[in-house]
Amino acid sequence: MSLRTALLLWLLVLLLFAASLLVPAGDLVSLFHQDRGLAFALLRELRLPRALLALAYGAMLGASGAAIQALFANPLASPDLTGTTSGAALGAVLTAYIFGFSAPLALSIGAMGGALGALLLLLFLAGPAAETATLLLAGLAISALAGALTTLALALAPSPFAFYDAYEWLMGSLIDRSLSQALFAALPALAAILLLLRLRPALDSLTLGEEVAMSFGHDIRRLRLLVVCLTAAGVGACVAICGAIGFVGLVAPIFGRRLTGGHPGRALLPAALIGGALLLASDLVVRLAPLGRTLPIGVVTALLGAPFFLWLVVHMRWRMRR
């Protein structure tokens, strides 16, 4: 990735982050003239946590998607298509019935456990270098199983209020999150991204095959375990606070690889930046959509990502026929 492209990406992310804080600017400026303390409180308590969560969650999905795609040597692998997000949602819902949705530490532990279990199951079923069809079937099976168990947990909710809270949370939302909750998700996500970035040389070497990567001195089993654990920890922490948000982890790494000449390891940072930008932009759509009610951000990312995924499948099939 050239220096110019990197600077443009950083500038895009900063502009979207600033827009998330200030849009709609007219109302904020009017409030600033009337009550400066209230305007700063609005920025600090409502706008900043929401923008920070969008940036952290999107960056985590982008980086983890790039790492998983490199690990499986497959461009269709992503946290939601491999069952990671569904597993994290299941773990969080089961934990919430015991501790409630107001216990972020318990929710994070439950979500991380669910994400880790889903990834380990995928590694067992599909193998570390699975073909596209095998990976998709195994990932879809795990996602379907986790989704069914989550639905069962909802059906057996201890009260209608618990059912409503769980259902609303599963749709994915950045609304009404405090700054402490935002930091609770952002800090583990940032740590996971930084540690994943240290694995870039090993992930790049996997494109030449496991034997070649081992000849370079990389421990493939350790690498596999690190990617699985870091992805589960980062995604699980974000899912515990914001719910399940899909397709960002699929779309962002694909554009990241295009910017880095197809190198999966080098695509980690661009994918993180693009993922953060995508979720910030999706949150702006949620806030500006004239629907009279709040649209779940998971719906927006699905509406954007599902057509892209279908195009990607058709494009790969067309390339295989050539």
Image: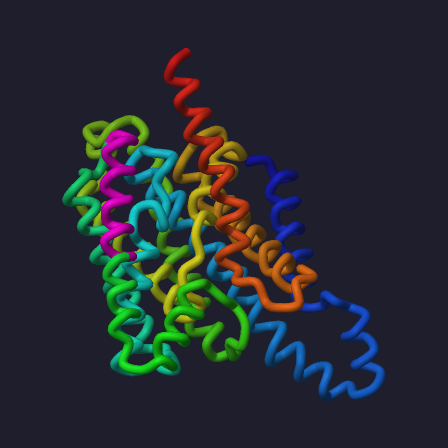
Residue 301 screen position, x and y as percent: 51, 51
The answer to whether 89 appears left or right of 215 in the picture is right
Mark count: 0
Q: Quadrant of residue 318?
A: top left
Asked if residue 112 is positioned above or below residue 126 in the image, the reply reads: below
Residue 178 screen position, x and y as percent: 51, 79
Residue 177 screen position, x and y as percent: 51, 76
The answer to whether 2 appears left or right of 204 in the picture is right
**Residue 144 included in the magenta stretch of the image:** yes
Q: Quadrant of residue 240?
A: bottom left
Residue 57 screen position, x and y as percent: 47, 60
Task: Name the residue: 33% across, 44% down.
Answer: 68
Residue nearest the observer in this picture, 107 or 172: 172
Asked if residue 293 is positioned above or below residue 278 in the image, the reply reads: below
Task: Name the residue: 66% across, 84% down.
Answer: 41
**Residue 71 included in the magenta stretch of the image:** no
Asked if residue 81 is positioned above or below residue 13 in the image, the reply reads: above
The answer to whether 58 appears left or right of 229 in the picture is right
Task: Name the residue: 49% across, 31% down.
Answer: 311
The residue stretch that appears in magenta: 131-147
Q: Residue furthest top?
A: 322
